[in-house]
Amino acid sequence: MINLIDELKAIPGVIGASIVAADEGLKATNLPNFFKPERLVLVGNHLLKLYAAGQLSFNDLTDITMNFDESVVVARALDKNIILFVICDPNFNNNLLNMSLNLLQDEFKAQNISTLSTASPTPAPAAATAPAEAQASSDTNLDDLFSVMEKGLGKILGPMAEFIFAEVVEKWTANGVANGSRIDELIKLLNQEIIDLDKIEHYREIISPALKEFQKG
Amino acid sequence: MANASDFVDRVSRIDGIVGCVLIRNDGKKIAQSLDNPEAYTELMQSSNSISADVMDSIGFSYCRYVSFTQENFDEFYMFPIENYLLGVVKLAECSLETMLETVYQLIGRVSTGGAEGAY
């Protein structure tokens, strides 16, 4: 789970993040050591309480932000009893953090679904053929997603997008296996090419439906 | 807080603000420009108390505000002002900077500490 929050730390102004589960305590943190684990659990539990209260007033609540004199705490529930909170400098990039939290939340859901499916104690009789079919389906979905991502990049970067996309995908595949679990790395590399934060946000909006569809499988 | 109604009225006049409610720490309503202030008062009290808990747990100092963001990016803000709490319903298109500037200017006029000069 630590890999989920490590990317948040790369955002300018983000000090670090923690994930706290109501029943399991601290699940991950990359905050500096002076934030003691027991304190982070307390903070997580306070935020879970406030999140639950917030949902009574706003059923489509996404984030809670606490703005203190020296720092800002942004909290998002990943699940009913699991909260992620990010501690930032006051001048952090809110749009970029929001976009990253959306991606992280999708990835968290995908990981949970994957964990649930691999934890199934009695595989169905057809399971022997399932991996190959799943792989083929996954490849097709990845191709579809790439097509949307490349077209979307064209709307952001213009005629050079095709070339840039190919170059970034090449870099991405050089760093590891080209599969859906690393799609956020690819998006991060593309964002580095787009540079402009408004355009990054616009690109996210363009690819979001296809990304969600892909993650649903 | 003699001009509580005027205070609420001025905050509500900011472009993109739906309305606001001013309550005492104990939940007593002082002034409001929202149709359903009761929908927010308990949340404001919880926000105030839990932000203080977070502050104590992690060692932060003064809490300027707590905000709740919805999927459509509309937001609800809770500002602690000494013994009072101000709740503001803000639409997504409302400039956060303008809203904060105006609210803090107004808070500065009616408050002797806390949020004064925080912005």
Image (cartoon, coloured by chain):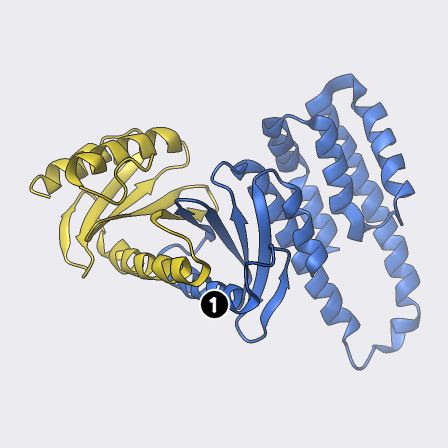
- Residue A162 falls in image quadrant: top right
Percent x, y for residue A77? Answer: 53, 59
The colour applied to the residues of chain A in this rendering is: blue
* Number of marks in the rendered image: 1
Residue B71 visible somewhere in the drawing: yes
Q: Nearer the viewer, residue A41 or B74?
A: A41
In this rendering, the answer to whether A198 lies above or below A45 is above
Which residue is identified by label 1? Answer: A42
Which quadrant is home to the C terminus of chain A? bottom right
Percent x, y for residue B1? Answer: 11, 44
Q: Determine the residue located farthest toward the left in the rendered image.
A: B2
x 86%, y 47%: residue: A140
Residue B16 visible somewhere in the drawing: no
Disc 1 on helix, strand or loop?
A: helix
In this rendering, the answer to whether A116 lies above or below A65 is below
In this rendering, the answer to whether A42 lies above or below A125 is above
The colour applied to the residues of chain B in this rendering is: yellow
x 62%, y 40%: residue: A11
| A206 to the left or right of A148 | left
Q: Nearer the viewer, residue B91 or A148?
A: B91
| B64 to the left or right of A88 | left
x 73%, y 45%: residue: A184
x 39%, y 57%: residue: B55
Which quadrant is home to the N terminus of chain A? bottom right
